[in-house]
Amino acid sequence: MDPNTIALLAGILFILIAIVGGGFVIKEIKIPKVPRWARIISGFLGLIFCFPFVIQVVNQIIPSDNNTDRTIYSYKDSNISIHGFKLLNVLAKSVHKPPQVNDHITVEFTLQNVSKNPIKVLETFIIGRGPDGNNRDFGHTNENKTIQPNEKILTKDSIIVDVPGVWKFGPSYDLGNETYPGEWQRFQVRVVQ
């Protein structure tokens, strides 16, 4: 059992003492009365022991979208696809650098139509591959959108990296008859335990 689990169990025990320390009797079960000062101390200790667990759960559930996120990958050069999309930037952020298991990684990229014609996309998305190579694509946006010349579109979303190892991400779009690109500006992120 890891120290966090032990602390959580101790915290729950102290909180129970604080709550039921007034004593009660149910049939053959009798819980003796605990002095008021001991109940207050137990409640205080229970909250202290449970606090790290609560913070950990909140960090896993709520993706951090504030300035405390650290840039783990950045690409700012311009790169034009064969269809006329200019990749203006790719950015990946996480709370930790390097990211840890169960962190949220937020990836975003911006495309600009630099051709002279409108381009219709079925969607834009972020290619995601876990360490096992399985598909973890996410951020499906801009569905059935026609991008006018010089128009810019943003794709941004988060994923929870739930296993350690090397993850791969990259910008992508689907034109219906073709998904592009295969390895276009793909980058790697090492996730640690």
Image (cartoon, grey):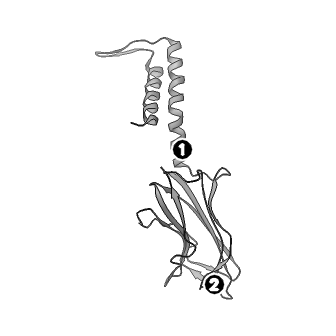
* Residue at position x 54%, y 61% in the image: 189
Q: Nearer the viewer, residue 65 or 129?
A: 129
The answer to which of marks 2 and 1 sits earlier in the sequence is: 1
In the rendered structure, which amino acid carries the disc numbered 1? Val
Identify the secondary structure beneath mark 2: loop
Identify the secondary structure beneath mark 1: helix
In the rendered structure, which amino acid carries the disc numbered 2? Gly
Classify mark 2: residues with Cα within 10 Å, few (<14), some (14-19) or many (20+). some
Question: Image quarter for residue 44?
Answer: top right
Q: Which mark is residue 71?
A: none
Q: Which mark is residue 58?
A: 1
Q: Nearer the viewer, residue 164 or 52?
A: 164
* Residue at position x 49%, y 56% in the image: 161
Q: Is residue 42 left or right of residue 90?
A: left
Tell me where residue 75 appears, x and y as whole percent. 65, 68
* Residue at position x 46%, y 31% in the image: 7
* Residue at position x 53%, y 67% in the image: 169
The number of numbered discs placed on residues in the rendered structure image is 2
Q: Nearer the viewer, residue 77 or 9?
A: 77
Q: Which residue is tagged 2?
A: 84
Classify mark 1: residues with Cα within 10 Å, few (<14), some (14-19) or many (20+). few
